[in-house]
Amino acid sequence: MVRVQTQARAEEILSVCDRYGWKVIVGVEPDQDEDISDVERLLHPPEPVKAASTAGRNDPCPCGSGRKYKKCCGTNVPTSRG
């Protein structure tokens, strides 16, 4: 559902949605504020949050010592055993 203030703006929104094959209901309400947030969300979807990568046991330590992670900063990290 999209709310716009003029018929020209409604046609503009409909043309954008038709271009992408989206179905939309457009209401022309001159006395209300424009609300096109649903179309904006479709045009610019949020990026998924990515988990930070962690150093594996045999990877070089991120502290820069040149030693393996398990022999350096990973010595006091508890391991999860199933």
Image (tube, rainbow, N blue to C red):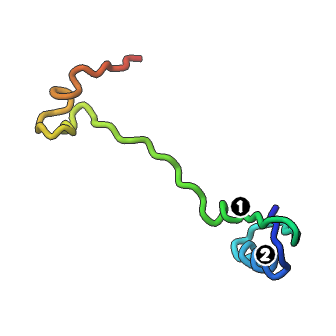
Identify the image quadrant of the C terminus.
top left
Q: Residue at x 38, y 41 (%)?
A: 52
Q: Which residue is drawn at 82% across and 61% down?
A: 1
7 w.r.t. 23: above or below: below
Quadrant of the rendered image containing residue 27: bottom right
Q: Which residue lies furthest to the front in this view?
A: 31
Specify the label residue 14 is tagged with. Answer: 2
What residue is pinned by disc 1?
Answer: 37
What is the x, y in percent for residue 30? 87, 72
Question: How many numbered marks, from 0 up?
Answer: 2
**Residue nearest the observer in this picture, 40 or 56:** 40
* Label 2 secondary element: helix
Q: Residue at x 80, y 80 (%)?
A: 11
User: Callout 2: few (<14), some (14-19), or many (20+) C-alpha neighbours within 10 Å?
Assistant: some
Label 1, label 2: how far apart the Cα atoms are: 14 Å
Q: What residue type is labelled 1?
A: Ser
Whether residue 73 sits left or right of residue 5 in the image: it is left
Quadrant of the rendered image containing residue 41: bottom right
Quadrant of the rendered image containing residue 15: bottom right
**Residue nearest the observer in this picture, 56 or 66:** 66
Q: Which amino acid does label 2 sit on?
A: Leu
Q: Which of marks 1 and 2 is nearer the N terminus?
A: 2
77 w.r.t. 67: above or below: above
What is the x, y in percent for residue 29? 88, 69
Whether residue 45 sits left or right of residue 76 in the image: it is right
User: Callout 1: few (<14), some (14-19), or many (20+) C-alpha neighbours within 10 Å?
Assistant: few
What is the x, y in percent for residue 80? 37, 19
